[in-house]
Image: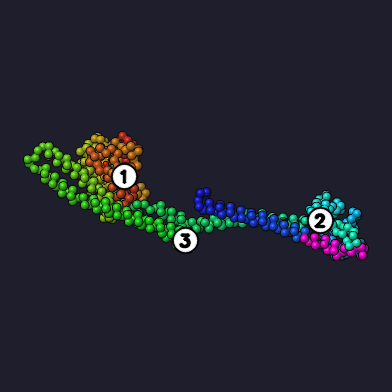
Amino acid sequence: MNTRSIRFRLTVWYAALLAGLLLVFGATSYFGLAGYLEWSLRDSLENQAQQIAVSHLADVGLTGEDYVIGEIEEHYAPEINSRFVRVTRGDGSILYASGIPEDESFDPTGLGAATLPSDEPFTRKVFLPDGKGGLLLYTMPFTARDGSCYTIEIGAPFHAIESVLRGLLFTLAVGMPIIILLSIAGGYFVMRRALEPVNALTHSAERITSSNLGERLPAVNTGDELERLSIALNNMVERLDAAFTHIRRFSADASHELRTPLTVLRGELEELAEQPNLQEESRERIGSALEETDRLSRIVESLLVISRLDAGEARMEKKQFDFAELTAATVEQLRLLAEDKGVSLVSDVEGGGVEVEGDPARLKQIVVNLLDNAIKYTPPDGKVEAKVRRNGSFAILEVKDGGIGIPAEALPHVFERFYRVDKARSRSVGGTGLGLAIVKSICTAHGGDVTVESREGRGSMFQVKLPIVAQE
Ligand code: ADP
């Protein structure tokens, strides 16, 4: 799992926020309910104490204490209602004290004498000894009409409040993690669906290179920011496509335009060289100018080939033919060139069955360029070998030489335009620095590829891979 992905980070943020909010909500509910329950219990204790005081104890001088006891028993039934009622006379003797309630939730026998630190009524929590429960105890001083003083105590077990709060706590403790887990799972799933178009866009954008700028990103019809992004990216690709096309056309046109003046220049120079009364020095200079014109022509021709291939304007024939046969024939054509240089040229070509589909003239150029380089960069008495074989669904052409080789740091650049390891050397052997760039462009245009392996001073091996025609 990528912890830096938007999906992961949003889910974590969202889960943390939800957990925080749920905690605040849980704490507020818990303490709010605790406060409310205690307040309402205290209120009801206070009311009962007031009633006992005003309705029954106020006239104790007239009705007698037994009457008061009977009234309390009758109206408040402390043992049945799980309430504790105790009325203490001013001298500390007990007028009335209720016993253990029916549900035995508390046992007031161990409760100490009534305490009244001031003249004001007050409430406190009392824990009965020996774990016999706890009471919320309201204590109130009262003076009857006849002037006798009493202390009225009303208590109720607070375990009921505690059990309600425990229930709430349990619900929160179990419910909150479940809610958080479900929301994480849901959030992750929703996020995945929402970000799916981003993945699709990324994959398509990765496939677009300068050679397939005609392709477009998939339409994201979500009506949201992603749709806007995909439209913006497609517009950008379109602008790039237009700019690239413009540049390629320009290169192709420029190379094309240069051809004619170069031919004219060449003709003029040749004519000049044939003048009979020419001084030797002038003849030499004209010869050198002719050589440079030739070089220039080769560069312009190569540039034209490359820019046309780039612009997809090169008229590419689509023909099915045997690549092994084409290679063998090309090797024969170059044999003379090799012999002139004292290089032995060997071909190992599988007889037939390596059918490829493409432009034979262009594919021949691949073989010519590679063999030409191999011969150029191999010293006399060296050996150059051309091999064609079939490997799965590919035709493999290998051109191997025992020449000067290519330094490791130059290997990644040899297919770049105008790249030459040793400029002076390339120039002296008539190189343009475009031969391998042409090979690469033709390979790409045929859905193939070219790679090189080389060791300086030991030789090089260029390998071309072209898809073969599937045989039914
Ligand atoms: P060039 O016209 O200069 O040969 P290429 O594009 O054909 O241009 O090759 C680029 C460079 O790669 C050459 O300048 C040369 O340094 C190097 N190179 C190509 N083929 C070979 C080879 N068979 N052996 C050694 N170096 C080579």
Spatial separation of the CA atoms under disc 3 and disc 1:
42 Å
Give the mark nearer the N terminus: 3 vs 2: 2
> Going by the image, does 8 lie left or right of 317?
right
Quadrant of the rendered image holding ligand 1 = top left
Packing grade of label 2 (10 A; few <14, some 14-19, many >=20) is few
Few, some or many residues within 10 Å of mark 3 (<14, 14–19, 20+): few
Which of the numbered marks, if any, corresponds to residue 160?
A: none
* Dot in front, 3 or 2: 2
Label located before the other in sequence (1 or 2): 2
Q: Is residue 50 magenta?
A: yes
Q: Residues within 10 Å of mark 1 (few under 14, many from 20)?
A: some
Mark 1: amino acid: Glu
Which residue type carries mark 3? Asp
Q: Position of residue 2 (x, y in %)?
A: 51, 49
200 lies left or right of 384: right
Task: Please report the bounds of the magenta region as a residue range.
Answer: 43-64
The answer to whether marks 3 and 1 mark residues whose Cβ atoms lie closer than 8 Å is: no
The figure's colour scheme reads rainbow
Spatial separation of the CA atoms under disc 3 and disc 2: 68 Å
Q: Which residue is mark 1?
A: 416
Confirm whether residue 328 shows in the render: no
Q: Nearer the viewer, residue 467 or 79?
A: 79
In front of the other: 209 or 457: 209
Q: What residue sits right under mark 2 in the picture?
A: 120
Q: Is residue 230 magenta?
A: no
Discs 1/2, front: 2
Between the residue at mark 1 and the residue at mark 2, the CA separation in whole angstroms equals 100 Å
Q: Residue at x 13, y 45 (%)?
A: 270
